[in-house]
Image (cartoon, rainbow, N blue to C red):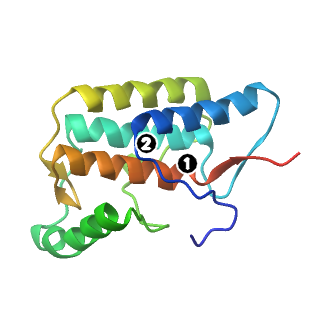
């Protein structure tokens, strides 16, 4: 973890993701402040994660990475993520996946939980635009690692 102030997180189940988000929201409701080690707010993180879940169900917009890139770097990245539960910081994202500022946390939390439910209940798309095709268990690991990565940037501020 290169960014100072990140929490060490590892989710094995989606209810752990919900519990973590609920705990962070609960801290705010109790009058405690959150601190973020990165550039995004908790609402922006929830929005980004919800978009990723939605895309695994509905498909990703735009053109996937070229076949050769998916077959080489994409395969290495997928293997690393699925085997070592690691997602590097600072990976460039297409503009469509960058959250806008000033999002409502309650709405984004609800959206994230709704998209998790859709992911758990629905059929999935054939693949990720960079990582390539994945099975349902691989998609689950992808999302759990992705959630762990992004939510690790948010913690309850010390009093």
Q: Is residue 29 left or right of residue 127?
A: right
Determine whether the residue tagged by mark 2 lies in a helix, strand or loop: helix
Q: Depth check: 66 or 159 in front?
A: 159
Q: What count of labels does the image hold?
A: 2
Q: Residue at x 62, y 55 (%)?
A: 39
The tag earlier along the polypeptide, 2 or 1, is 2
* Residue at x 20%, y 27% (from the top left corner): 122
Can you tell which of label 2 and label 1 is closer to the viewer? Answer: 1
80 over 56 or under it: above or below? below
- CA distance separating discs 2 and 1: 9 Å
Q: Residue furthest front?
A: 12
* Quadrant in which residue 123 is drawn: top left
The residue under the point 73% across, 33% down is 27
> Mark 1 highlights which residue?
151
Left or right relative to 19: residue 79: left
User: For mark 1, does the 10 Å Cα neighbourhood hold few (<14), some (14 to 19), or many (20 or more) residues?
Assistant: many
Residue 79 is situated, as x and y percent measured from the top left of the image, at: 25, 68
Residue 117 in percent (x, y) is at: 34, 26
Residue farthest to the right? 159
Residue at the spot of label 2: 49
- Classify the position of the N terminus by image quarter: bottom right
Of the pair 38 and 85, the residue shown nearer to us: 85
Q: Report the residue at 17% width, 76% height from top.
A: 72
In contact (CB < 8 Å): disc 2 and disc 1: yes
């Amino acid at each position: 973890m290169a960014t100072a102030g990140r929490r060490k997180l590892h989710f094995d189940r989606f209810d752990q993701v919900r519990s973590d988000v609920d705990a962070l929201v609960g801290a705010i409701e109790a009058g405690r402040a959150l601190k973020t080690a990165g550039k995004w707010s908790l609402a922006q993180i929830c929005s980004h994660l919800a978009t990723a879940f939605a895309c695994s169900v509905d498909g990703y917009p735009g053109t996937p990475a070229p076949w050769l890139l998916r077959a080489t770097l994409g395969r290495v990245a997928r293997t690393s993520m699925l085997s070592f539960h690691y997602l590097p910081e600072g990976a460039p994202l297409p503009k469509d996946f960058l959250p806008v500022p000033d999002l409502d946390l309650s709405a984004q939390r609800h959206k994230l939980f709704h998209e998790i439910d859709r992911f758990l209940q629905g059929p999935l798309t054939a693949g990720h635009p960079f990582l390539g095709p994945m099975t349902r268990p691989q998609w689950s690991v992808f999302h759990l690692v992705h959630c762990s990565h992004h939510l690790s940037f948010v913690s309850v501020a010390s009093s």
